Image (cartoon, coloured by chain):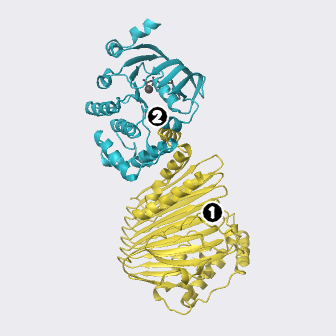
Chain colours: A cyan, B yellow
Amino acid sequence: MLEIKGLEVKLEEEDKQILKGVDLSVEAGSVHAIMGPNGSGKSTLSYVLSGRDGYEVTGGSATLNGEDLLDIEPEERAAKGLFLAFQYPVEIPGVGNMTFLRTALNAQRKLRGEEEISSADFLKLVRAKAKDLKIDAEMLKRPVNVGFSGGEKKRNEILQMAMLEPKMCILDETDSGLDVDAMKLVSDGVNALRDEGRAFLVITHYQRLLDHIKPDVVHIMANGRIIKTGGPELALEVEKNGYADILSEVA
Amino acid sequence: MAAQLKPKLDALEARLASLSLPEGGWSAPARQDALARLGATGLPNARDEYWKYTRPDTLVAREAPAAAVFEASETPIFSGRDRLKITFVDGVFDPEQSDALELEGIAIERLAEAGTKDIHWAKDLYGVLEARGQSPVERPLAALNTAFATDGILIHVTGTPSKPVSLVYIHKDEGSDAILHHAVKVETGAEITLLENGPAAARFNKVLEVDVADGGKFHHVRAQGRDHERRAATHIFARLGEESLFKSFTMTANGVLTRNECVIEFTGDDAVAHVAGASMGDGDFHHDDTVFITHDAVNCESRQVFKKVLRNGATGVFQGKILVKKDAQKTDGYQISQSLLLDDDSQFLAKPELEIYADDVACSHGSTSGAIDDTALYYLRSRGVPLREAQDLLTLAFLAEALDEIEDDSLADEIRERLDGWLARRRG
Ligand SMILES: Nc1ncnc2c1ncn2[C@@H]1O[C@H](COP(=O)(O)OP(=O)(O)OP(=O)(O)O)[C@@H](O)[C@H]1O
Ligand SMILES: [Mg+2]
């Protein structure tokens, strides 16, 4: 589903190389996890894939279902099924959460040449999905993420994912800031979406999340590269021993 | 002083040559007084401090600069609601397009009939609040209006009418120069909503005087635009009694020159006044909100919320003053003026002022200019919202705080739809 080959990325404004040749292949139906020390480039990878400004691709490629991702606009990537749950969800004062969700859903449908969803169907859908995530009506009415607690923001990201039903879901530290119960809710939300035709790339620092969302493959990223790939046991090793061993192993 | 006054008096003389005093009847003394005020000040010019950011020349010129008639494709705003409609075409009352001037809870008269009908309550209001509003800052265009207004609507509110009074202004003549003067007296405990919309004329000078007695409520929602070439100088003068409420909101889309002045005076304790505006313009759009609020009573609340979206070299102006007199303790005054600059060519000129003589007050003001938030834009796009649509969504979000000042939800929704439609049409 997602193919990343030799991806090299630098900052647009500075001469600072952040990704130094990332290779990653995520098949449909699978869950991959990325772990790695702070500052290793995990979020940068997710931003570059989703089309954020400020980065320059200096080498390599990234495709979604065989189609080039890097040359198209962020909204087109979304319409093709890419979704990023942000490490730091953005507050948008003045835009209601409901308006935001409906606009996004309809915009994607339009870009794909599909019919817009009716108001009634939309309401039904959003209520059901919000209920699963214990997001109350009042939160839906508020401006996007404004005044939300850290955990509420993360749940709101998963609500968007549940509504938009993307094909390739990237979750950047969705577990950080979640209490134990919310972690369970969010994981259930993710697991409910697990499907043959969908894949997940879960960025996390902790094994805890991976207890709930069982990954098929675990990657370790360090200094702008994937330095090691393995099974779920790799995450357990990191949890126990930190990164020192792995880093020295490849050095 | 005299040297500065001379050109203003010369301008007045030139202007007066193209005007004639209407048959005044009961309004004649007020018109004479206004003429005398005008004779002392002359007409404003570019050197006036109060006209530093907005050139008054086309507003004071002898003839109205021509303005092409704009044919909107959409149905006029407010037309779908239950209302008492009163229409003026190029400043001339049109009975054909107006409802009968009757509504339970109010009495409606026309200024043009002043010569033949005595309207005692209007006599005590017409030109009175305008005259009070001439100090400490002179407003010659308003005095000119009082003297020469050809017509206007006079509303005496004694109850709570079931529907709003809706003034509709139609522009048909490219050279029309309209002067209208409305006066509303809201009696104790009474309540009214006044709506205004339409381009009015090539040049429009309008005054609205609103006297709200104790416990009275006045709501005002106005839509200007989206015709572009017309020029408008409008004034609202309001006087607020004890525990009264005054709320005025204006939406402006387009217009080469709009100057909306609002002068509010609190004379009774515990009253509330909110005045807000949301404007959007392009290119040679010039939009000026000038507000002066005088607190001369205890425990009153005033709020000014003005938002302007400017692009392609458009100019936005805000001059807002809160004056708190010595005995106006417990005053709560808030003022915010903000612009969203969609490019580097557009400019926002703001002059917020506080002048406070009481010691127990809470007043704040702020003014900002900014661009669209890139991070929010990316966030929206990452969810599939196309760039232009995302920009428009954030533009509406920017205006939201001003729209929140409209008390009636259905009116707020209608304004929001109009703004949305305006943006969507631009997107094509
Ligand atoms: N816009 C930027 N300006 C300057 N430095 C940047 C920018 N974006 C990323 N970086 C740098 O690139 C490196 C990678 O950052 P990134 O956020 O991708 O790390 P991460 O792996 O997600 O870290 P964490 O686990 O702490 O979230 C860091 O050193 C960071 O400071
Ligand atoms: Mg990160």
Chain at numbered mark 1: B
Q: Looking at the figure, which quarter contains the N terminus of chain B?
A: bottom right
Task: Write down the residue under mark 1.
Answer: B255
Where does the image place residue A101, in percent across and percent down from the top left? 42, 45
Task: Write down the residue under mark 2.
Answer: A81
Where does the image place residue B150, in percent across and percent down from the top left? 60, 82
Q: Which residue is at 43% across, 32% downward? A: A167
The local crowd at label 1, few if under 14, some if 14 to 19, many if 20 or more residues have their Cα within 10 Å, is many
Image position of B336 with respect to B102: above or below = above
* Front-most of residues B302 and B255: B255
Where does the image place residue A209, in percent across and percent down from the top left? 32, 25
* Front-most of residues A143 and B80: B80
Chain at numbered mark 2: A
Q: Is residue B262 visible?
A: yes
Distance from label 1 to label 2 (Cα)?
Answer: 43 Å
**Judging from the image, what secondary structure is the residue with disc 2 in?**
loop
The local crowd at label 2, few if under 14, some if 14 to 19, many if 20 or more residues have their Cα within 10 Å, is many
